Image: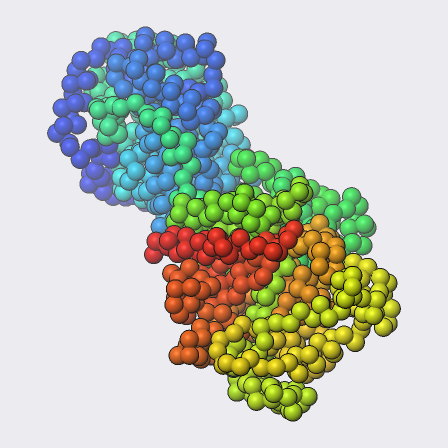
Amino acid sequence: MRQILLILVTLHISLSISSQTIENPLAAKDVKGQKKWVDSIYNSMTLAEKVGQLYMVQVMSNQDQIAKNKIVELIKTYHIGGLIYSLGGPVKQAKLNNELQALSKVPLLIGMDAEWGLSMRLDSTYAFPWNMTLGAIKDNNLIEQTGKHIGEHCKRLGVHFNFAPVVDINTNPLNPIIGNRSFGEDRDNVTEKALAFMKGMQSAGVLANAKHFPGHGDTDQDSHKTLPTINFDEKRIDSIELYPYNKIITKGLSSVMVAHLKVPSLEPSGYPSSLSKHIVTDILKETLGFKGLIFTDALTMKGAADFKEIGAIDLAAFKAGNDVMLMSEDVAVGISKIIEAYNHGEISEARLELSVKKILQAKYKVGLNNYEPVGLNDLSTDLNRLKDDILYEELLENAITIVKNEHNLVPLQQLEEKTIAYVKMGDDDGSVFLNELKKYTKVHHIEATMLDELMAKLQDYNTVVIGLHRSNQSPWKPYQFSEEELTWLYEIARAHKVILDVFVKPYVLSDLATIENIESIVVSYQNSDIAQQKSAQLIFGAIDAKGSLPVSIGNYFKVGDGIQNTAIKRLSYTVPERVGMDSEKLNKIDSIAQSAIDGNMTPGLQLLVARKGKVIYNKNFGKHTYSGTQAVTFDDVYDVASLTKILATLPLLMELEEQGEVTLDTKLSKILPSYKKSNKANITLKAMLSHYARLKPWEPFYAHTLDSATKRPSNKYYRTERSEKFNIEVAQNLYLRSDYPDSIQKIIKDSELLNKLQYRYSDFPYYILKKYIENYYDRTLDFLVQEHFYKSLGANYTMYNPYHKISNKKIVPTEVDDYYRFQEVHGYVHDMGAAMQDGIGGHAGIFSNANDVAKIMQMFLQKGYYGGKHYFKPETIDKFNTCYFCNKGNRRGIGFDKPQLEEEGPTCGCISLNSFGHAGFTGTYAWADPEEEIVYVFLSNRTHPTAVENLLSKKNIRTDIQRLIYEAIID
């Protein structure tokens, strides 16, 4: 015992010595000016005015007039020193605050509980992640930024003190009041995070407050309701609970809030810590050398209020060493008790002067010597900024933690082998998570009311993502699994590979009796929209996994655990500024897109822009048809027309070239022996795919099958019912002769060459390559692109003949055909030549959405790599993205279109010559620029109801949008 006392005495002396060097955290830069102002105000005050400064009263901006009148009386009659705002709205609070400040002789010091932002108390304001989430982040610069952003919000609203950060070390998982409000259970991590948060907030001109002294982290009771007990000895409290205070006090902490706790080892009398002179004065002020403001926790809380009669508790708190009485039960009585004690000599002038002058110093430091009302213009906008969203994204990307990952299941790869289901648990919404998962591959939401029913529905799936979604409204909301959910989880995990993703605090994993059969566990901490989006992106490897657990979880995981994963270069989704683009400039695209709809250039469209591997603009406009009501959505598919050339046929050819089966100099006579005696025998792949081979632009093959008299499909070639002889479905209830594709190939082979060798765009090369590729593999083109590319890319919205596979409600119609099929072309390929090949053309036939097209273009942009798989070697991409005949006035690459060499061409003229892409007849466009790392996709059905006039091209809609994209680049 004597050794322990010796240690404590030594520690006390060393800390007392070091405290002499601690600067006054309330001192302003203009020390002389501050002292002069403080002294003049203090010296002009009556005793009652001085005592009034010790009080900070709760105000709610949504309160009624009776409550407001009471506050007005406290300001006018009792000269209170400050207000702590609680529930309400920002504009109401600003107006009320301006009104109340105008009534006060000395400007009021304004405080708020804004631990994770103003939204802790106010509607329509920003909510940053809770401290437990921040505790999972390794980069403390991000925590400093969070403190700064919250500080900026507070300052904008006229708040001078934010009662944050919470520095309690949450070593008790059952703590009912701290929990998510703590940075975790590791004292060093909590201290580093608190210091960074404090530094950021105070840099914004808002004073910080460390709470709840001497430490509320290891309690299992709520001091709002009772007096919790801290049953540890002084040595433990000094090494754990007091550790953060030891550190941050020396770094300029402005204030401390003293909790209502029973700490027998520090205060044997049983008094709450807030009323203990030994805890507040001897330890906090003397031992730790703290010179800033000391606030009581709310004096209305049961942890304090049960110990003294009304008013007496205020006096006891002041005598203990507190400077500010927060939320007194009765201000008038409390003030009278303190004045009475002063008059009886129980409180000295020096003691009163110390606290009041500290309060006045704080007022000067926050600028109340030159008080200005809160400006109302743009207030809501200023409190909900784009840069707050950007920071929130970064925080979640750095926080989400993989704690278990058997067989490296996360990130999900080899998507062609995965059948994925999503099962939602919890009582909150998980739709944002599900929709984000669906951006990467086919994911089905499976629901059932009974376990047997659920297991039956899951039989066809080998991978199940289970999301636990519970309320994100506050950190105190329930977070556990239900008993039924646990049973279902264990059963699903016994039969399937499972990724369990919990959108709650990590302690929920303690509910699990076993984690043996769960392959991967992800802790996402919160159920906000951004948390759901980022967690889905992490599961698919679009972002790195960086987080580490801020707390330990039973016997399963230790504090600091976290599996770090590197992204595998799938597209992620974010805001433009994160990749050096300007949101406002980029949003100008909206008006051009809408003008295309309003000008009847197309009924609807999908637009996507990505930069540096991140989708930054992804919007839909208009409807499926002018006369219809169905709005365009993300998962609608468009006939992409000639984009098929670079999305299907070209990649298959690039594979064969890479394998050495062909070269760019390979001649048609070699790949198709039937061409040996044709006029095309010596045409090379390079010339043909550069559209520099004298091939005819196109042939209206369908016209040869129309009745010469009626100009309708001839009975010689068509039937209205399928049969073996008439087996090619060109439209609903219209079947072409099964042998006609051979006629098409013969027409192409026998066609005359153009007289002059010059650039002339032609579809013929892709009819020819379709025949070659299908012959080589003995498989149809649609099967090949799925197996070689689309399934593994997660391009599940990309397909030939979608009417076989998805609902027509998700397929955008292309034309009301009055010249060939004489019906609305809906779900069938628009291009007549492709339709005559059973919908599977080398030049047309693919349907897709903008997101899937972007994946393929991004794969090209990344030199053939996407989602952890190398589809091509970088040199293959370069070889095909080369203009071999530029010196002949031909801009084309091999298959890819390239920017114009002169004024007119396929791009805005503001794009690098290294860029590449293609356009489609139906009003589609896809372009990639390696230099700026931009992918741009535009899908529309401008051909509906008629393809006669191409206003999109005449009005330069697609290229004008492209120009706006480049004008939005800011770095």
Q: Which residue occupies 32% across, 29% down?
A: 160
Vertical comparison of 655 with 868: above or below: below
Q: Which residue occupies 75% across, 56% down?
A: 822
Q: Nearer the viewer, residue 39 or 455?
A: 455
On the question of residue 930 being in view, the answer is no
Q: Is residue 585 left or right of residue 561?
A: left
Vertical comparison of 263 with 901: above or below: above
Q: Where residue 86 sits in the image (x, y, percent)?
A: 44, 24
Which quadrant, please, contains the C terminus? bottom left
Q: Nearer the viewer, residue 29 or 884?
A: 884
Q: Is residue 523 left or right of residue 748?
A: left
Quadrant in the rendering for residue 719: bottom right
Residue located farthest toward the bottom when viewing the structure as drawn: 677
Q: Nearer the viewer, residue 79 or 613?
A: 613
All told, the count of numbered labels is: 0
Colour scheme in the image? rainbow
On the question of residue 860 being in view, the answer is yes
Q: Which residue occupies 34% across, 53% down?
A: 970
Q: Where residue 387 sits in the image (x, y, percent)?
A: 39, 44
Q: Is residue 723 left or right of residue 560?
A: right
Q: Where residue 914 sits in the image (x, y, percent)?
A: 41, 70
Which quadrant, please, contains the N terminus? top left
Q: Is residue 947 left or right of residue 932?
A: right
Q: Nearer the viewer, residue 521 or 447?
A: 447
Q: Where residue 940 sits in the image (x, y, percent)?
A: 58, 54
Q: Which residue occupies 30% across, 13% down?
A: 103
Residue located farthest toward the front when viewing the structure as drawn: 709
